[in-house]
Image (tube, helix red, strand yellow):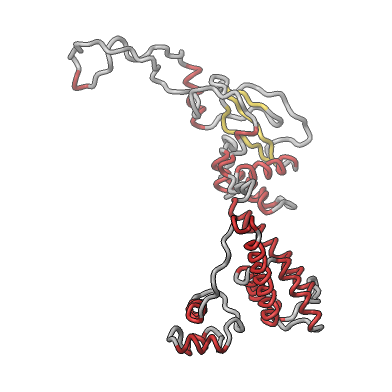
Amino acid sequence: MSHAATNWAIQQRGLKPTTKIVLWHLCDRFNPDFGCFPTQERLAHDCEIGRATLNRHLDELEAGRLIKRVRIVDTKTGQQRPTRYLLGFEFDDGNGARPSSPRPDGNTATGAGDTAPPCPPEDASTALQNTTKTPCLDLGHGQDAETSYGDEGKTLSVPATPCPKTGHGPVSHFGQNPCLKNGDSRVSKWDTNPVREPLSKPVKEEEDARARETAFDDFFGKLITALGFDPDGPLPGWWQGWPPREHAQRWIDDLGLTEAETLEAAKASRQEHPEPPDGPKALDRGMQRAARRKAQLKAASDVSKGQDGKGRRGKAASGPAPSIDELAAFYADRVKGDGYLPPSMISTAMCQAMLERGLVTHDQLRMRGVL
């Protein structure tokens, strides 16, 4: 690190907090003798931000003439080396960009800024060796494979296969295959982006459930309007929340009424009682009467079809009326069941018949609201 570079970073004013943190870590990586060569991954890790965000702040620093970035490409492998960052006190802001010049190690510096930067310490020794020595083209193995000190003097019965490797390894620190693309894809690594795109289409079950909820909300709004309330205005307490909606749903599920029949019964109740009902329970008797009328009309329709010739072939005539024992057993099952049971569905005589036959008890009738 350089204390002078760090003090210079502290003196810069008018920067965003994250932008100043990036400048701080650049100055922390600055070396007075060799320059500033941090990699993108190291700089993003030090600043604790993503690489895409890092490059946006670097663009702001470069636009403010606080840094200059110099791309360095290895002429031997064609791969890009770590970018050198020229800090504001290293270059003359009044002069324009100078042409690039080759580096001692064979690399080329491209971009605006000062002359080509010196190579890092590890590259300086390599460059000196490359200039003083002739490149070695010997494979390093010969006809036989290498032997250890303990195997000196021994000969191999089977000659070894020549090895095509030079024994020096790649000159570049990145890889052996040249990379000719230096686009934005090397900067913006999408795997570092924590944001994940949502599903383009919702799941089928969620879509159906949302459609059912929307349809029932429309029906409940029509019901409120038929009862004389303003659906967009404030509602009384007994018509708010999910309990009245669930109670209205029972009229359709348990009594077998349709939405149109429910709305018609609600409008008919306003003709008998001008004041709006105090909660959905006040409409139970009207809904039960509508359900009974619907059942009677259906029974009359079945009888008329039974008298017709086509109706007799399609459906047999209804049998005799059920006895009192059968009715008592039927209503006892409704009392013991978990389904919705309107309080006025079972008469007092039927309650007495069920009690005499021991089908139900007083506690069961009281719990179901019949007594």
x%, y% of residue 212? 65, 60
What residue is shown at x 52% (from left), y 87% (from top)?
351
Pick the front one: 334 or 353? 353
**Where is residue 286 drawn, in percent x and y?**
70, 79
Residue 84 appearing in the image: yes
Q: In which quarter of the image is residue 145?
A: top left
Q: Can residue 88 be seen in this view?
A: no
Above or below, 126 relative to 135? below
Q: Tell me where residue 192 sits by quadrant.
A: top right
* Image side of residue 173 versus residue 18, left or right: left
Q: In this view, does 18 lie above or below 82?
A: below
- The quarter in which the C terminus is drawn is bottom right
Label count reads 0
What residue lies at 68% left-to-right and 43% top-to-bottom? 56
| Image point (66%, 49%), residue name | 9
Q: Quadrant of the N terminus?
A: top right
329 and 114: which is toward the camera? 329
Percent position of residue 273, x then y: 79, 84
When the figure is inspected, residue 155 is found, relative to residue 335, above or below; the finding is above
- Quadrant in which residue 101 is drawn: top right
Q: Nearer the viewer, residue 357 or 100?
A: 357
Identify which residue, 344 or 38, lies in the foreground. 344
- Residue 113 vertical placement versus 200 (above, below): above
